[in-house]
Amino acid sequence: MCQVEECCWVVYASRDHEDTCWQIKTFYDDHTCPRENSNRAANRAWLASKLVKKVRKYPNFKQCEAATYFRSKCDLILHRNSLARALADARNIVYRDEKTNPGSTVKIGVTPLPDGQVMFDKIYICLSGCKNGFKAGCRPLIGLDGAFLKTQIGGQILSAVAQDANHHIYVVAWAIVNIENKENWKWFLELLHEDLGDYKANGWCFISDMQKGLISAVEEVMPQVHHRFCVWHLWRNFNKQWKDLELRRLLWDAARSTTFQDFIGNMDKIKRVSEEAWTYLNKWPRHSWTKSQFSHRPKLDNICNNACEVFNARIKEARSKPIITLLEEVRMFVMRSIAKNKIKLNNHIGKLPPVIQSRLEKVRKESKNWVPIWTGDEAYEKFEVHGQPTNMVVDLGKRLCTCQLWMLTGIPCVHACAALARVNKRPEDFCHPLKRADELAAALAAAAAAVAASKDKVAATGSTPAPEASNSTNPATSAADIPPPVSGPQAEEVELSQPSYGRTQDEAPPPPATRPPMLPTKWKTTPQPVTTSVDPMQGASAATSSRLARFMKMVPTPQFKAPRKKNP
């Protein structure tokens, strides 16, 4: 009922006969009382929660517009002070007045115009949490790729994506450029090299498609770096000239070969089928597309750039949105993926991550088909493992196997698992540190809190100061006022990176949540069935009873000897 006694508005509901839901029996929707435009439930927190979406969509959302919005949508007339405080809270949630991610790098390239203004050209973003988490526990193999923006103006998004210890994608950096060419790739790789450190000291490796200008840009920025090619794109280019199914199979067999002998054998088969196809494949560097020549440093035997393909597929819808919205969607995706992986790891028990543990269990089961034979060394570590199709030599002390799969992946192969079973050791203890759960926890802990909404992201607000263009006398305009990307003169860079503060970002993470002890099971006592003795012959005739007695009488078989009775 309405609080006003004179008002006839009323609604009456009661439970139905099954007592499962409520049913409205009486409803009179006609208020005759005077309308009130104030509500005590519309407090500061509620107003801020409603204004967050508006501020995200309209960065310059004003207080008068907020008052009009609540008056039209909610029929509320709010005091200007409460509305101003709620609007300030909403802006703090969206833009974070405090610096939540110190050490991040955000650079904007602008093109000077004749009238003294500047035009947006490109932007590079690498959050501190992402790069610190990558250095803490991710594989040193970085995937590089570009994808088209599905807008009327066009453009490209460049990305650098790695993989953590659980084989999940880990986004390191991304950039928006007007076109994919050697100049933009070189600009992106130079900034990435500055953020991640020296590639020789850290052993960074790269995998990418054969895109425009990317191979030459990698050679100029990081000479003699281990650079793999995606075999899937190599196969697509190969398939344009040779449609033979046998050649396709031999190409993948050659790429998956882990030993040099197998690779040479598959290449000889290709040469016998088509010498032109063999010449085409032989012109590519062997260390870029076959496992037999890969570097053992990344502990990852990927021959396809699937990590970048997954990232591009996840932001497929966001690529059709404006640049600011696209950058916010990418940041939210990175934050959600890291938080989700961290929750999965907290609920997992074991030395290895879940994906690595399942793969190792599969390899351990297959190792039963191999027979290890000790070679006679004093340390009892060298074995010759016999099986099909060939024999292998395993050295447990140096963690080597002639199949090279142990060195490529960091996980004991079937031959190593067979030898470890012979010496009664656990394969989990012989996995590389990059495959362990503690390395994954370190990577996620370094990035989980730091990827939250940061002031480094490019957003146009009144509280965010406009950056100044380097080597230019004209200040840079806000991101909302920057015109769309166009081709023009050489772009200048605007430095938006935050300085590193005294307090470190990589503080000790809180202890992971432990599972509560299992409660004792409450056994339900079931009542014992009541047994009653019933005479089956009750009500039967005397003749029936005698026939049943004769039938149940034991008739001894021939040569049957009754048991002797013991004397009392």
Image (cartoon, helix red, strand yellow):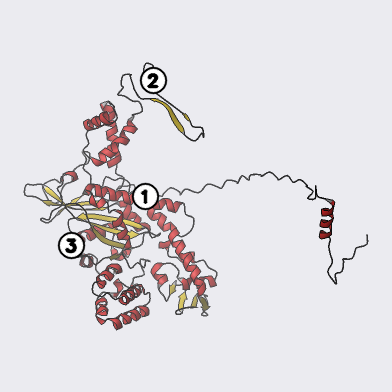
Image spot of residue 466 (x, y percent): 18, 43
Q: Residues within 10 Å of mark 1 (few under 14, many from 20)?
A: many
Asked if 201 appears above or below 518 in the picture, the reply is below
Can residue 370 be seen in the rendering of this structure?
Answer: yes
Q: Nearer the viewer, mark 2 or mark 1?
A: 2
Q: Residues within 10 Å of mark 2 (few under 14, many from 20)?
A: few
Mark 1 residue element: helix
Query: Closer to the camera, 169 or 267?
Result: 267
Residue labelled with disc 1: 448
Residue at far top of view: 6
Q: Which amino acid does the dot numbered 2 rest on?
A: Gln
Distance CA(mark 3)–CA(mark 1) = 33 Å
Q: What residue appears at the point 23 percent right and 47 percent down from the top-left corner?
A: 324
Query: Closer to the camera, 478 or 380?
Result: 478
Tag 3 or tag 2, which sits nearer the N-term?
Answer: 2
Q: Nearer the viewer, mark 3 or mark 1?
A: 3
Tag 1 or tag 2, which sits nearer the N-term?
Answer: 2
Q: On the rendered structure, is 383 left or right of 173?
A: right
Query: Closer to the camera, 426 or 203?
Result: 426
Residue labelled with disc 3: 181
Distance CA(mark 2)–CA(mark 1) = 49 Å
Quarter of the image where one finds residue 71: top left
Image spot of residue 162 (x, y percent): 33, 60
Mark 2 residue element: loop
Residue labelled with disc 2: 3
Tell me, yes or no, whether the two marked residues, 2 and 3, touch with CB atoms within 8 Å: no
Residue at far left of view: 114
Image spot of residue 161 (x, y percent): 30, 59
Q: Which amino acid does the dot numbered 1 rest on?
A: Ala
Q: Which amino acid does the dot numbered 3 rest on?
A: Asn
